[in-house]
Image (spheres, helix red, strand yellow):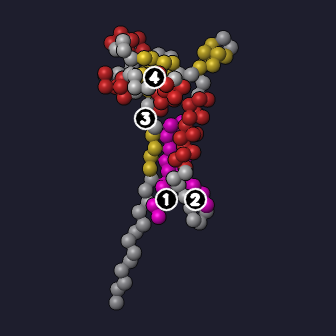
Amino acid sequence: RETASPPPRVQVVLHVDLDAFFVQVHRHLDPRLRGQPVAVQQHQDLIAVSYEARALGVQKHMLPADVRAQFPSVILVHACTLRRSGRDKVSYGRYRRAGRAVFTLARSFISPQKDTGRLLFEAASIDEAYLVPDLD
């Protein structure tokens, strides 16, 4: 007599990627940017583009000078910088703090593993992580 095997347990791994993360950090710092077409530049490269700016045709990695010429309504903000040795260097402190805050919230949706007590969460970058939610 055969007994039915229980169905295999499905494991879900979520990839969390905070879209337009650097734009969102700047909007948090300056609420006047909310709802506006915004792009964040780091030196001569766009590293984040808001949905409003994307709708106009602005794309990540465009040259800021080209954006100014082709899309005058787009607000360009520079990535946060610190002055070191007479030069401006990009400072990721505000972005790291914002990423940690979001990932702290994400961790609240995960239960520790029953056997080890560990959370199944791994940060992949400042604005990306993998997590295994508790589906029980």
> Would residue 99 be counted in the magenta stretch?
no
Q: Percent x, y for residue 64?
A: 42, 15
- Marked residue nearer the N-terminal end (4 or 1): 4
SS at circle 1: loop
The numbered mark at residue 112 is 2
Q: Residue 11's spot in the image, x, y percent?
A: 44, 60
Report helix, strand or loop for mark 2. loop
Residue type beneath disc 2: Pro
Pointer 3 or 2: first along the chain: 3
Q: Nearer the viewer, mark 3 or mark 4?
A: 4
Q: What's the distance in space between the residues labelled 2 and 4, CA to CA?
A: 38 Å
Q: CA distance from mark 3 to mark 4?
A: 16 Å
Mark 2–mark 1 Cα distance, whole angstroms, equals 8 Å
Does residue 48 appear to the left or right of 126 in the view shown? Answer: left
Disc 4 crowd rating (10 Å Cα; few below 14, some 14-19, many 20+) is some
Q: Which mark is residue 134?
A: 1
Q: Residue 87 vs residue 77: left or right?
A: right
Measured in 3D between alpha carbons, the distance from the residue under mark 4 to the one under mark 1, in whole angstroms, is 36 Å
| Looking at the image, residue 45 lies above or below residue 110 | above
- Residue 53 placed where, x, y %? 36, 23
The one of 44 and 34 positioned closer to us in this rendering = 34
Residue matched to label 3: 19
Numbered range of the magenta stretch: 117-136
Sequence order check, earlier mark of 2 and 1: 2
Where is residue 12 shown, x and y percent of the image? Answer: 43, 56
Q: Is residue 131 visible?
A: yes
Give neighbour class at mark 3: few <14, some 14-19, many 20+ (Cα, 10 Å). some
